[in-house]
Image: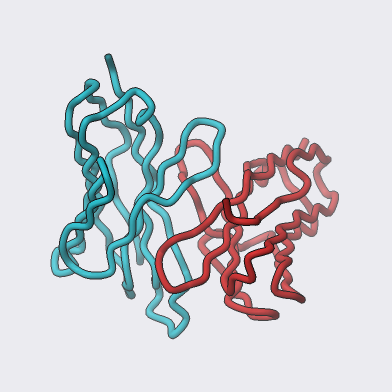
Chain colours: A cyan, B red
Amino acid sequence: GQSLEQPSEVTAVEGAIVQINCTYQTSGFYGLSWYQQHDGGAPTFLSYNALDGLEETGRFSSFLSRSDSYGYLLLQELQMKDSASYFCAVRGIGGSSNTGKLIFGQGTTLQVKP
Amino acid sequence: DAGITQSPRHKVTETGTPVTLRCHQTENHRYMYWYRQDPGHGLRLIHYSYGVKDTDKGEVSDGYSVSRSKTEDFLLTLESATSSQTSVYFCAISPGSTGELFFGEGSRLTVL
């Protein structure tokens, strides 16, 4: 089967650094994405890793290790507004020639405390 | 913001009635998706489309059908709604070259 695993909840304090892990088991893989979703809102794209290594975008970074089927999202200098749900998503599940299929993990709720 | 709109945004219906949700895009993106979101389950893929008249099933496709007769519109139909289909439905679009999806604002469906 196919699955993505991420922690259900993470708590951190303002100004700190937090890492949200994602492990996946899929029959096909083309890349790992991360999304943020605030309560009552729609998911918004944060980052995408197709190759191993670290991608940095401002306070957010995302890492991928294809050999370990593992990735993480790193949030630095946490702010209260970072309190949200974070989802990892795998593209290309199924190994079909159509690489557009995108499957999401169940999400990690991040609570940032003062 | 990506040009994507969903309609209706809110709907209450009764068990056994048909329901159609519409997703409309102005970006000319190749890929369109329908997800449902329920507490404790994250986002689950129902169906997606990789071109006009080209669709494929997702994780939870039973009880749902889709159609895409033109690039800009992707319709999700519940032939006979059940209470288990009460959910928030998100449409998303993507050009397909990366894992970046642009989501609509969601449609909240309640089946009584």
Image quadrant occupied by the C terminus of chain A? top left
Q: How many marks?
A: 0
> Toward which corner of the image does residue B87 lie, by quadrant?
top right
Location of residue B92 with respect to A93 vertically, above or below: above
Nearer to the camera, B2 or A89: B2
Q: Is residue A46 above or below residue B50?
A: above
| Quarter containing the N terminus of chain A | bottom left
| Closer to the camera in the image, B53 or B36 | B53
Q: Which of B14/A104 is in front? A: A104
Which residue is painted at 60% across and 66% down in the image? Answer: B32
Relative to A84, is A55 above or below? Answer: below
**Which x, y percent locates residue A2?**
35, 64
Seen in the image, is A107 located left or right of residue B46? left
Q: Is residue A67 above or below residue B51?
A: above
Residue A87 percent coordinates (x, y): 38, 47
- The quadrant where residue B92 appears: bottom right
- In this rendering, position of residue A92 left or right of residue B19: left
On the image, the x and y values in percent for residue B38 come to: 54, 41
> Where is residue A20 drawn, in percent x and y?
24, 42
